[in-house]
Image: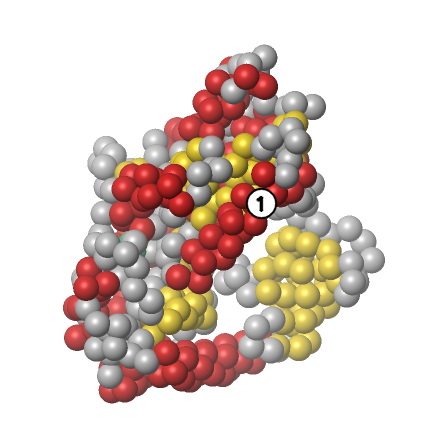
Amino acid sequence: MTGTYHIWTIGCQMNEADSRHLASQLEALGFVETKQASDADITVLNTCVVRQQPEDKAVRKLTDLGGVKKNRRHGMIIALMGCMVGKREAEDLAVRFPFVDIFMAPSQTDALIEFILQHDAYSHLNRAQVELADYRLPAVNREKTVTAFVPVTLGCSHVCSYCVIPHRRGPDRSRAPEEILSEVRALAVQGIKEVNLLGQIVDRYGFDLEEGINLAWLLKEVARIEGILRVRFLTSHPAYMDEELIRAVAETDKVCPCFEIPFQAGSDRILESMRRGYTQAEYRQIVANIRKFVPAASINTDVIVGYPTETEEDFLETMKLYGELKLDLAHIAKYSPRPRTLSAKMKDDVSADEKESRRLRLDELVARTMGENNAPMLGQTVEILVEEFQEGKNRWRGRTPQNKIVFFEDSTDRFGQLVQVKIEWAGPFSLIGRAL
Ligand code: SF4
């Protein structure tokens, strides 16, 4: 063993994927994971600044780590990674947190590997060890994970007024198809059954590649890989959700009929201010197209409440859009201004109380709609991919193709299997059934 590492991750699935990749690289160098940051020789914080709350959490964590490092006799490498680190921010952060050894922008895991290889304590290691490990799962994932996130587009070139991601992850670019397919093949060999193709705008995949290579093509190619039982993709942008993609989902058995398409706001005035590039009517049309070709599809969304200038009437348009479309899930965020974004120049004029009230009202509508959408599943048989055994509750947990959570009891080992389950109880957030 070379030493120990600990990675703390917050934020989106892209960060999860970056952390998994970094863990594989560190393990290839001989480092072993430890659960406690304070015990690790290398600690990485993989951060998110999409909202203020995760940023505050990372700062607290980092400050604690500074204290731990001071009291360590054998030193410790601390790396700060992810969306907290932009080109401009790294200098300020180095002044604020002088005990951090290295700052890495999102996905730039190689920077830490180079730093380690140059470090006196690790000069006996070499880069070739890491190259061999690129598609290996880290030990922690090997026996208890059946799903894996695979980034396919990196960065984002849209400039939604409120969003900091383009400033931190750079312009969007597609990964080469051979690289993605090799990674998925390697994951399948290691026991992964479901892959989730990721991008800030995943449906833009291939825009910078040769003609004919797009997300519809990629979904079909990934679905052909032996051992892969299910393919998912997120997050889509309404502007790129075309008929070819919807048909690919409809026609490819292994591709799950589950769409993640943020609408963010129901009011056209707010959508324009957000620079989202579509209207409420266009969003409705996309939902109608999906339901025409994929009637069983679930459609999930993201919504921001309390955006600057959002009136009660604007908010009611959001409620109306969600309620009428009866979407399956909404991730609701209360607006908070992010540095260097366009909306940060606007007055954050919706009070904290009002934002919370709007969040609660929408949350209540979402929960009620989820309950109504799930109720007809009572008595139906669904196919689930089993992801986990919950020791305390003595039951298995899995998901339907629509990404609904299902629990069932079974004394045999069902991990990683596709199981037919008859639904005997349907709540808004989960279903309970009996394995057939
Ligand atoms: S599409 Fe908009 S919200 Fe999504 S990552 Fe790009 S800029 Fe941010």
Q: Nearer the viewer, residue 26 or 76?
A: 76
Residue at 45% in and 70% down:
329
Q: Is residue 160 left or right of residue 45?
A: left
User: Which residue reaches farthest right?
Assistant: 411
| The N terminus lies in quadrant | top right
Q: Is residue 205 visible?
A: no
Picture coordinates of residue 430 (x, y %)?
60, 71
Q: Is residue 350 visible?
A: yes
Judged from the image, the secondary structure of the residue bearing numbered disc 1 is helix
Vertical order, 35 against 349 (above or below): above
Which residue in the protein does label 1 denote? Answer: 67
Quadrant containing ligand 1: bottom left
Q: Is residue 154 left or right of residue 66?
A: left
Residue at 77% in and 65% down:
393
Q: Nearer the viewer, residue 251 or 435?
A: 435
Picture coordinates of residue 125 (x, y %)?
57, 15
Residue at 40% in and 45% down:
96
Callout 1 crowding tier (Cα within 10 Å): few <14, some 14–19, many ≥20: few
| The C terminus lies in quadrant | bottom right
Picture coordinates of residue 233 (x, y %)?
42, 51
What count of labels does the image hold? 1
Q: Is residue 370 left or right of residue 278?
A: right
Amino acid under disc 1: Gly
Vertical order, 340 against 189 (above or below): below
